[in-house]
Amino acid sequence: MLLNKILKVVLLLLGGTYILLQGFALEVEGDTVGAIGFILLTVLYVGWTKNKSKLFLMFLVAFTTAQILSFIGWHRPGLRDGQTDYLYYIANILSIISYALLILKVFIHLNLKTVFSQLTVPIIILVILDIFCVTLISSTTENSFNLYEYILEYVYNVVIMLLLSIALINYMYRNNYKSMLFLIGSIFIMFSEIIQLAYFYILKDDNLGYVYSSFLVVAFIFYYLQSQHLVTEPTPAYSDDPIEA
């Protein structure tokens, strides 16, 4: 129990350090701290979570591996002109896979017949919004990538928006504490990814480094908190109808 508490304190300190380093544009040092932090978070989940989810563990492993590859990318020889950055593709594909695993984790516990019958209109609205947002976000960086990088970035944005949408649908369906924590975490992930995109390819404002890294840290705090709760049946929506005697 003591080791568990120490590990949580260390993770919070690493999270704060990561935010400061990214805010000061010390990306090499920030990615180093980030990689260590995600490794320790995975250890914390494996060692002190009573009811583990295989999909959530796979999410942590895939995301952590992507962070480690990003860290390795800073310490390899420089690429020659025209040389393909395979680490960039692998790290981003692993991030996409990690978010897809989160989507699958939520999706497999949904009663699709009930969801589509009760939430038809919200689902249609979310699909329209997802298409609009992904197209808008991807178009802002179209000139910053080659064709393959743009396709990868587009798929990345699609998965992020799907994650947020499935988290919102899950919350509307379940209406409980775990689904609320997951939704909040997904909201912070989405904003973190969008702001990070703007930071690297559009504005290059150091203040955005503080923002996207803070959102990322907060997102994983909520993801970890929700992982400590079991998946339960939906909670009936609140009703103010009078109780019959």
Image (cartoon, grey):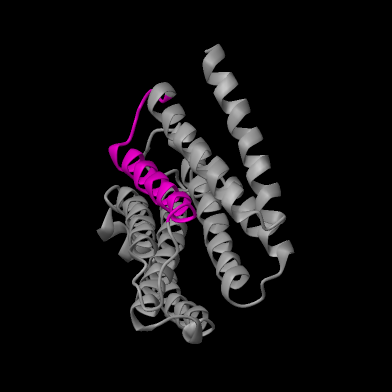
Vertical order, 117 against 54 (above or below): below
Q: Residue at horizontal 53%, vertical 38%?
A: 37
Q: Residue at horizontal 42%, vertical 34%?
A: 42
Q: Residue at horizontal 47%, vertical 59%?
A: 168
Quarter of the figure with residue 93: bottom left
Describe residue 238's horizontal placement relative to residue 108 as left or right.
Answer: right
Q: Residue at horizontal 45%, vertical 36%?
A: 39
Q: Is residue 151 visible?
A: yes
Q: Is residue 243 visible?
A: no
Magenta span of residues: 49-76
Quarter of the figure with residue 26: bottom right
Say which of 192 and 226 sits in front.
192
Main SS class of the magenta portion in the image: helix
Vertical order, 58 against 126 (above or below): above
Task: Report x, y in % for residue 104.
Answer: 30, 53
Task: Report x, y in % for residue 208.
Answer: 69, 64
Count of number-bearing discs: 0
Task: Report x, y in % for residue 38.
Answer: 48, 40
Task: Report x, y in % for residue 13.
Answer: 66, 34
Residue that protrudes farthest toward the top in the picture: 2
Vertical order, 62 against 201 (above or below): above
Describe residue 112's horizontal placement relative to residue 23 as left or right.
Answer: left
Quarter of the figure with residue 23: bottom right
